[in-house]
Image: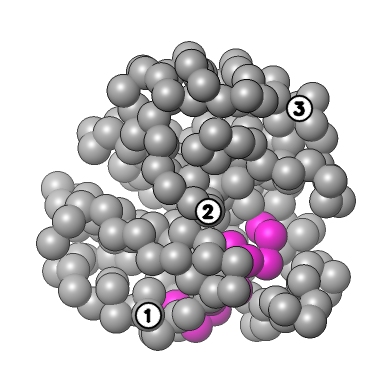
Amino acid sequence: MPQITVEPVGLLETNCYLVYVEPTGRLYIIDPGADPDVVIADANKYEYDEAVILLTHAHVDHIGAVSQIARKLNVKQIYLHNDGVALYKSPDNHLMPYVQRAENLPDVTQEISKPDFEIIETPGHTPGGVCFYFKAIPALFVGDTLFAGSIGRTDLPGGNSAQLIKSIREKLMILPDDLKVYPGHGPTSTIGREKKSNPFL
């Protein structure tokens, strides 16, 4: 099995990532936004000891399948930055009529015991946006902060374009040029490629 599986889910084709860290036996499920049965089938291909859910931010297209997956895979740890909790719980967190609000969402935590990754706070797309840096792979999961050739939108509630650019330039563009970037939508890239050719940076 590959160490990283990508599954575009839902109407907006949100990239849900499954990251298996063999030394710790953990399977990290990043941004399970929809299609829980598909994500669960992917997870069951791995021989993991514990499944953990990580959320880069709380927009509905990134959290829609959290409750079903957490229940089916007996997930005990779900990470979300504290600044994203209000949106996570908000009844207005939907894109009607296309994406309905997530129901029966389990509680989240702001800490993961003995993580295999570093949390990089990158507010701008949303107040509680973060990226997950798995140095040992290496891989950087950026949610909707950064895309191949683009950046996250900031016209939704809580968005801040100046803050987003600052987050990307000061937190992400200082990382190694050859570091592979896994965004919330669309294809992968590298830090070096975005530093050189992203027109927003």
Q: Is residue 115 visible?
A: yes
197 or 167, nearer to the observer: 197
Answer with left or right where residue 105 lies relative to residue 87.
Answer: left
Q: Check disc 1 and report the residue beneath it.
A: 38
How many residues crowd mark 1 within 10 Å: few (<14), some (14–19), many (20+)? few
Can you see residue 73?
no
- Structural distance between the alpha carbons of marks 2 and 1: 17 Å
Q: Nearer the viewer, residue 143 or 134?
A: 143
Residue hosting label 3: 163
- Percent position (x, y) of residue 34? 53, 75
Give the residue at x 15% y 69%.
47
For the record, the magenta segment spans 58-69
**Rendered-image quadrant of the C terminus:** top right
Name above or below for residue 198 compared with residue 131. above
> Residue 16 location in percent, x, y?
44, 62
Count up the numbered dots. Answer: 3
Q: Is residue 66 located in the magenta-colored stretch of the structure?
A: yes
| SS state under label 3 | helix
Q: CA distance from mark 1 to mark 3?
A: 35 Å
Task: Specify the amino acid type for callout 2.
Answer: His
Identify the disc placed on residue 188: none
Amino acid identity at mark 3:
Gln
